[in-house]
Amino acid sequence: MRKIIIAIDGYSSTGKSTVAKKLANALGYVYVDTGAMYRAVTLFALEKGFVSDSLDAKSLIEALPNVELKFRPNKKLGKSEMFLNGKNVEKEIRTMRVSEQVSQVSAVKEVREKLVELQQAMGLDKGIVMDGRDIGTVVFPEAELKIFMTASARTRAHRRYKELLERGDEVSFEQVLKNVEGRDFIDSTRTVSPLKPAKDAITFDNSDMGVEEQFERIHSYAQRVI
Ligand code: C5P
């Protein structure tokens, strides 16, 4: 069976990662969550004091060579976790503090260049499911299968709100909805690699679809290509 690259892009909290992980497991592929990489750079910028009211992009760009990102497998949990300069930051990068700043950090050209290069290196041997915003358009424009997921902003905010509450974060639904809509806006209107479906992507709205149904659909598309 030949190995392919599967690109899963879409709006925030469309459940891309859940389906992408399941798909990677079923195919014996590597799963890469590129959002985690942008989140880790954002955490770095916050820790260094480059983000307050606005982003000090110049200082962040200068410090970028000091950012080392690694995914390391956590065998117990059966998933990979993000390490920033040797420290496990998997929990911290999912907080609202990071979510509120990540889109402006992700709009910086030099940040994207660094991360796209790392992502392309991870896909050299194919056999990879990567999720993000620009995987089918910029990172792997030649990916054999491209999926673009959408859902209504309220549905996505509800999913995210539930996740954050389960994790013990104190947030309001309105705060989460505002963040989801704000990130959609910045992500899709930025000059560098804006969020949009690739011309050859299969787009679907999963507002009324469960994980299993989404998985079955994408899995059957993948079987056709493999
Ligand atoms: O996927 P997740 O919601 O964790 O991504 C967080 C943010 O990272 C997005 O809102 C977007 O600003 C940025 N991102 C990006 N390009 C990617 C993945 C994520 O710009 N490939």
Image (cartoon, grey):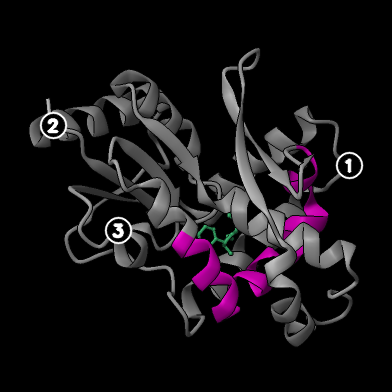
Residue depicted at 68% across the width and 64% down the height: 102
Residue under numbered circle 2: 2
Main secondary structure of the magenta stretch: helix
Residue closest to the eye, 161 or 41: 41
User: Of label 2 and label 1, which has the lower sequence position?
Assistant: 2
Does 2 sit left or right of 127 as displayed?
left
Question: Is residue 112 inside the magenta stretch?
Answer: yes
SS at circle 1: loop
Disc 1 residue crowd, few under 14, some 14–19, many 20+, Cα 10 Å:
few
Which span is picked out in magenta?
A: 91-117
For label 1, being within 8 Å of ligand 1 is answered no
Is any part of residue 177 visible from this angle? Answer: no
Give the image location of residue 131, x and y in percent. 43, 47
**Type of amino acid at the residue the image marks with label 3:** Phe
User: Of label 2 and label 3, which has the lower sequence position?
Assistant: 2
Farthest left residue?
224
Quarter of the image where the C terminus is located: top left
Give the image location of residue 219, x and y in percent. 24, 28
**Type of amino acid at the residue the image marks with label 2:** Arg
Residue depicted at 60% across the width and 79% down the height: 108
Distance of label 2 from label 1 (alpha carbons): 46 Å
Farthest front residue?
65
Does 148 sit left or right of 33 as displayed?
left
Distance of label 2 from label 3 (alpha carbons): 17 Å
Give the image location of residue 174, x and y in percent. 75, 55
What number is the disc on residue 170?
Answer: 1
Is any part of residue 115 visible from this angle? Answer: yes
Give the image location of residue 77, x and y in percent. 64, 17
Judged from the image, the quadrant occupied by ligand 1 is bottom right
Residue under numbered circle 3: 140
